[in-house]
Image (cartoon, rainbow, N blue to C red):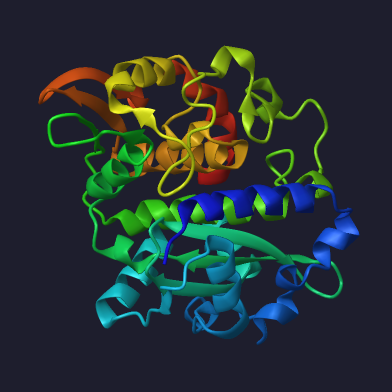
Amino acid sequence: MKKSTLLLSALFLITAFCSALTKEEFQKLPYKQTSWYGGTFSSELLEKIRTFEGNPSEFLKELDNYDGYQNHKLTEEEKKLFLEYFSYLPQKLQQAVTENVYAIYFVDGMWYGALTDIIFDENGKAWCTMFLNPDTFHYSLDDWLTYRDNSVFKNVDKKNKVEVKTGDTHTAFLHLFLHESVHVYDYINHITPYYNEAMKTQSADNLFYSVWQNMNEPLKKYQNKKFEKTAFYEYGTKIPIKNGKEIIDYLAKTPFCTLYAATNWMDDFAEAVTFYYLQRRFGNNYELTYIKDEKANAVYSYRENQNVKIYDSLCKEICGF
C-alpha cells in the first residue's frame, strides 16, 4: 500500500545520504550501476523496453514504498503511439534517448507520470533509465495536467479547483516523453548545475543560477512561502485551494512556465523546453485557471508570461527553432 509520509521521509533521507557521498561513492551505489539492470545496451528504441521485474522492480517499489506496481506490456496501439511520439521529439532529444537510455520500463500502478534516473557503467560512463506511466497514453494532456496541478492543493472539489487548458490534441504521453527526454539530455550534457551535490559540473555563471539559489530553492524574488514545502501527487504538504489566486499571481511574476517548473531546476528546464516546443510545433499553450465557487477567479497563461523568455535561447538550441 502507499504510505506517503514514509515515502517523503525516505526521499529526504536518500537525498541527504547521496549528497554526503563523493562522486565515486555515488556511482558505485548498486542501483546506480548498469549491472543492476542487466542486459546490454541497444540503440533500437523498442529494444530498450524491458520487463519490469527483479532489481528494477525492487528499486522503484522501495523508493516509493509501494507494493502495487506491475509490469505493463504495451498494446499495439500504445506501441504505435510510442513510436509516433518519439518521431515528434526534436532531433537532439531523439538522439539523447537513442544513444543514452539504457532501459525503459512501463509500470502499471504509478500515481505520478514518470521517473528518469542516471546510472553508470563500470567505466563511469553515464546512462539513463526511464520508468513511464502507461496511463498517460489514455489521458488527454489537459486532463493529466489538471490532475497533476490540483495535487498541489487541498480542499479541492468540483466548485473550487484549478483547470489546465493547452489546446493539445495528443495524449498526455507526448508531454511526458518530451519532459523525460529533456531530463536525459540534461543528465548527459550537464545543462543544469547538478542533480546531486556529488555530481557538480557547472560554474557559478550557469544560466540557472540567475533563477535558482540551489537545486530546490529559487532566488528570493521568485519564492513564495506557501509553495516552498509543497509537493505534487502524493508528496509533501498541500496549499489550501482558497489560495489559488495567490499562487497563479505568483507564477505570472516568475520565469517558471508551469507550477511544476517551480519545484527544482531540473523540472524547470524540462518544462521550459517541453512547452517551448509544444507551442512552436503544435501551437499549444499552458493556461491555468483558478475556479472559485464555480467561477474563474484568476488565470495564468504561459504564452503571456514574458519572464519565461529567459530560457528561449537554450530552448531554441535544443529544439532547432
x, y (%) of residue 3?
Answer: 46, 58
x, y (%) of residue 146?
Answer: 27, 41
Quarter placement of the N terminus: bottom left
Instruction: Specify whether 22 is left or right of 188.
Output: right
Instruction: Specify whether 21 is left or right of 217.
Output: right
Depth check, front residue: 133 or 126: 133
Quarter-wise, where is residue 291 in the image?
top left
x, y (%) of residue 44?
Answer: 54, 79
Depth check, front residue: 255 or 314: 255
Query: Does any portion of residue 94 appear in the rendered image?
Result: no
The vertical placement of 189 against 87, above or below, is above
Q: Residue at x 55, y 17 (%)?
A: 222
x, y (%) of residue 129?
Answer: 60, 68
Depth check, front residue: 144 or 275: 144
Q: Residue at x 41, y 73 (%)?
A: 68
The vertical placement of 131 against 210, above or below, is below
Query: Does any portion of residue 103 appear in the rendered image?
Result: yes
Q: Residue at x 54, y 55 (%)?
A: 7
The vertical placement of 86 against 302, above or below, is below
Q: Residue furthest left?
A: 294
Instruction: Specify whether 25 is left or right of 48.
Output: right
Q: Residue at x 58, y 52 (%)?
A: 183
Quarter-wise, where is residue 251 in the image?
top left
